[in-house]
Image (tube, grey):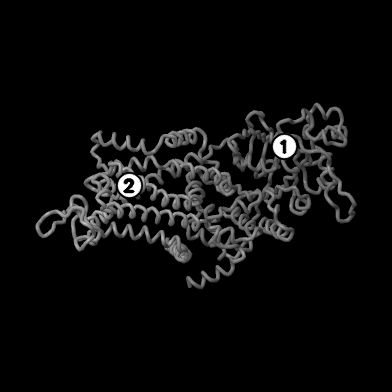
Amino acid sequence: MAESALLRVRNLNTEFLIPDQGAARALEDISFDVHPGETLGLVGESGCGKTTALMSILRLLPANARISGQVFFKGVDLMTLPEKEMRAYRWRELAIVFQGAMNALNPVMRVGEQIREAITLHRLMPTREAEVRVGELLELVGIPKERGAQYPFQYSGGMRQRAMIAMALACSPSILFADEPTTALDVMVQAQVLELLNDIQQRLGLAIVLVTHDLGVVAEMCDTVVVMYGGKVAEYGPVDVIFNDPQHPYTQKLLESFPDLNEPTEVLASIPGTPPRLTEIPPGCRFEPRCHVCINRCKTESPPLLRVGESHLAACHLLVDKL
Amino acid sequence: MNESWLLFKRNLADFWRVFRRNRMGMTGAALVLIAVLVAIIAPMLSPYPPTAVIRDEAGRGLTFAPPSVHGPLGTDDAGRDVWTQLVYGARISLTVGFLAGFIAMFVGSLFGVLAGYFGGWLDNLLMRMTDVLLVIPDLPLMLVLVATLRQMDLKISPLTVLILVIGLLYWTSTARLVRSQVLSIKERQFVARARAIGAGNFHIIRKHILPQIMPLIVANTVLILSTAILIESGLAFLGLGDPTQPSWGTMLNFAFDRNAISNGAWWFYLPPGLAIVWVSLGCVLLGNVLEEMLNPRLTGHHLEGEARVVETEAASG
């Protein structure tokens, strides 16, 4: 199982050194695998470390970040590579569609040129061939190739998002990180973008890591789900298991707070409280202050990830008794 | 190669179409171009060499002669033709101004980009240098520097000294302006994206930072040119020009020294003064308009997209 994984993240820890406040522990012991052709969903509320996890893997964090742990990509530990060699992996193997991708395009560069930039930077092919490839990529995401000669401001939001996806595919990466690819798009365009991602995955067979807080998207797109809370993995398992048999109280609450079309309720459930401040993390379980079923042990001891089923892991003290 | 050249030509044509309609910009460009043209064809504009003394039939030098058939702007205290000095002076004033301006622009942009992009100790070092230069009053510093360097027998011409001193002291405002822009641009997401596609620092600066600040640099350069010309005139007026290669400032210095004003010889001191105003006004007008125009976001909207493509397709086919 582990041998076939494309990307193996092991005990990834990331903290940010903040002047006068010490360290903010943004990620603690994150581990997950991404297999070829798989779609992995990273879910959790704002600030739980989803984006930080992606950026840590790509080593694109600001200078005050301290990362430890291992990230094996095809057996190579990316964390120990010199920056220069790491650069060869970025985009060539691991591409990312940024959160709010519409801002990730340079406003004074033609869109086609920006897509070509990724190809020529890695010297994959001569400029003229790259030109043709850019046209193909644009057509692939449903943009007429003539519009490659235009600037981003001449695109609509959805087109920009699709152009970013085209750019992410430019070097035929093995893994595509999609950081909330549908945020800030209207529902129709959201559906188009997701369909596009699905279609591309089917055609090109790449693995996708989808970061989102939209459980509907997860249910539709993902094979495996990592539920994160306060910088830790709360639950990890196949999508149908997570949705039908959630073990972690946070996952249960999260699913409850998602509207169900079949059984509409007057008031939508919500989880009281707010996520912990990363500079003042509780000594025990990070979810304890908001948990409806917490016990005394939760206040003092951080629960380990327990195997609750085949390839199903959850971090909760209550599960010890169930096993 | 050929395609990018075509693209560049089309961009230039687009730029010209908009620029042509801008009256302020055209006026500025015309003022500057006329001055440059005069400097280039100076020998064709005057029948005399710049140092020739105009004499009357009796062979006496015509001193402080008002405008007449001998010369459209009369003569100076030594009987030399003022018009001739003016057109040859354009060469000196513009050369010093342009070279000094370009040096200032280059140093300022380089320091601004390095300080803004890399930050840390480099930023600190460069910006403290800038602060030091900013707090020392320019004019006294330049006077002392030019005078000292002249004394030092460096085997470089007085004009070169002037160019270097102005160029190497006037980059501070450009450096600060560029740095502040770079600081804001490098935090934008497309820079993070460029890093994510595997780009290095040099590539990011060249492809993503420089094009963004280029409009600023171009416009700022044109504005710096006018400052450089004014500073040169000031220094030359104070006697630090090269008397053997008189610029407009040097002419003013001569006129002032030799009592042109009390002699009522307005044709001696007004023309160089107006010429300086002419060029700096031209630079300021042009600079302001360029700054406005070179911002690509002010030129269209995404809903006009389709129509534009069709139009350019038709135009190129």
On the picture, is A11 further left or further right than B84?
Answer: right
Q: Tell me the chain of label 1.
A: A
Task: Specify the amino acid type for callout 1.
Answer: Gly
Residue A28 x/y as whole percent: 70, 34
Residue at disc 2, secondary structure: helix
The residue singled out by tag 2 in the image is B233
The residue singled out by tag 1 in the image is A231
Q: Tell me the chain of label 2.
A: B
Local crowd size for mark 1, using a 10 Å CA cut-off: few (<14), some (14–19), many (≥20): many
Name the one closer to the observer, B111 or B240: B240
Name the one closer to the observer, B304 or A252: B304
Above or below, comparing residue A53 to residue A203 in the picture:
above
Q: Quadrant of residue A29?
A: top right
Task: Specify the amino acid type for callout 2.
Answer: Ser
Above or below, comparing residue A155 to residue B143 in the picture:
below
Q: Please state the total of marks drawn on the protein image.
A: 2
Q: Quadrant of residue A14?
A: top right
Residue at image x 12%, y 54%?
B60
Q: The N terminus of chain B lies in which quarter of the figure?
A: bottom left
Inspect this view and state whether residue B3 appears: no
Residue B118 x/y as whole percent: 50, 39
